[in-house]
Amino acid sequence: MADEEQQIVAFLSQPAAYGLPVGEKIGHVETHASHVFLAGDRAYKLKKRVKFTFLDFSTLERRRAACENEIELNRRTAPDIYLRILPLTRRGDGFHLGGEEGELADWLVEMKRFPASGLYAAKAGRGELALSEVEELAEAAAAFHRRAEVARDAGGAENFLKIVEGSAEDMKPLLGKVLDAGLADRVTARSRELAGAHRALLDRRRAEGRVRHCHGDLHLGNVTDIGGHPVIFDCIEFSDRIARIDVLYDLAFLLMDLAFRAERDPHLEGFANRAFNTWLDRLPQGEAESEMEGLALLPLFMATRAVVRAKVTAAQAKDDAAKERANAYLQFAGKLLEPLPPHLAAIGGLSGTGKSTVARGLAARIGGATGAVHLRSDIIRKRMFGAGPLDRLPEAAYAPGAGERVYGEMLKLAGHALDAGMSVVMDAVFAREGERGRAGLLASSHGAAFTGIWLEAPLDVLEARVAAREARGDDPSDAGLAVLRRQLSYDIGKMDWTRIDASGTPDEVLKAALAPARAFH
């Protein structure tokens, strides 16, 4: 650290720098690129005078630009946290924070302070992160990605290959010392292979506007609970190359973080899958098909994020535990890059049988680290009519012919996901033989294993569940008691799917449904 930077850090470590009384404790957190000082109800970030291959804070003007970018970009998701930039001036009697008098020495970002205990990474570590919080976070991420600025001059195959090669270069000094050299070479080789194989898809997604100015560092450590809601903060402000990326690559960091943690913490099982499907459910109609095709990139994107974690953890490793964690990330990257045969499961039954509950549970348990794509006819119908998952649709959305279009859309999306190598769980009534037959044909035509499950329960159970769901108003299904009574008159024809009694608890029904599905895993 340069002499002046040392002097600045010493000054900012004192309560007087912020007008606080003597004896007030000032917190100091140091990262590879910044010093953060915690003073009263504020936090102040000072950029280090460093220059790396991916970051350059070596001049005063570069640090000012980075501070301005940090404020502007983070206000997209955390406007109440990021307040302003402050000049640090040098006068005869020392340094002063704020004001215009004196010689300019540096710039700081002023933020509203929040408790570290609210960080989602901390909550996950304590076993307190709730699935509902992760779902809300995924909704926030989806909304952010929808409004993010499109960047047609970034991303694409060439730029993604640079990310892969950059990580390989960064790992070289660590190979054999911290990281397993053979494993690192295999992961890099496989990543190059997949990036090359998907060159056309990477470039097409850029042309379609799926490369945007994203967060760039979207993991649990950069999300905090404020007022009972997730707030995403600390985006990449110093590099357009790192931040202007495919939206799926941005999401992949969160999914990788959740899936990696779940391998060590059973409490987090299925969290990555719910984040994944919640994000997919919020896609507008014009993007759903493209995104299903793009899922072929997800294993590569998640593995690349795991490699980033591996190299950063390894570079900072000071003990055996950190070295083990760095290699665990690298091993996880290798696991993500192993292809899995796709599986199509279809869950049918009348309203109140608990199809979506079973489908959600099944999707979390088949299909690898992120689980399977969950395609729910209720949500697909809402999307096709331009409504949100919890919006109520008019009767016209259920007019003759509408149902056929919904099933057609569901099958089309499932086909794209299967072609992308993803397993899929379709969730609909499937009351007609033809609908069930088309599901089975879809699996065989895409080379996927197939499981068909029909849920059934006594009438009093169905009525009680549908009435309770209507009263809560928290479910995408518009089907009430009147719809259920119409369904009871359906002739379902020959049933060759596995019949399961759905009158038990959700765990009991899911356990019964997993038995036929796991025959293929």
Image (cartoon, rainbow, N blue to C red):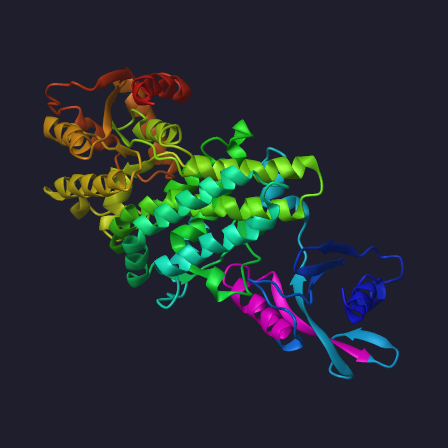
**Which corner quadrant of the image does residue 481 belong to?**
top left
Question: Left or right of 241: which side holds 325?
Answer: right
Foreground pick, 65 / 427 = 65
Image location of residue 29, percent across then percent down: 72, 54
Quadrant in the rendering for residue 189:
top left
Q: Is residue 329 above or below residue 245?
A: above
Q: Nearer the viewer, residue 382 or 287?
A: 287
The spot of residue 3 in percent (x, y) is 81, 69
Q: Which residues are magenta?
A: 62-90
The one of 344 and 463 positioned closer to us in this rendering: 344
Horizontally, residue 123 falls left or right of residue 157, namely right
Using the rendered view, name the quadrant where residue 518 is placed: top left
Q: Is residue 226 visible?
A: no
Is residue 424 inside the magenta stretch? no
Give the mark count.
0
User: Is residue 418 visible in the rendered structure shown here?
Assistant: yes
Q: Is residue 414 above or below residue 74?
A: above
Residue 341: x %, y % from top left = 30, 31
What residue is at 24 percent from the left and 16 percent from the top? 499
Measured from the top left, where is residue 8 in percent x and y? 79, 68
The image shows residue 405, relative to residue 17, as above or below, that is above
Front residue of 19 and 221: 221
The residue drawn where x is 83% and y is 64% is 10
Residue in the picture at 51% in, 35% down: 331
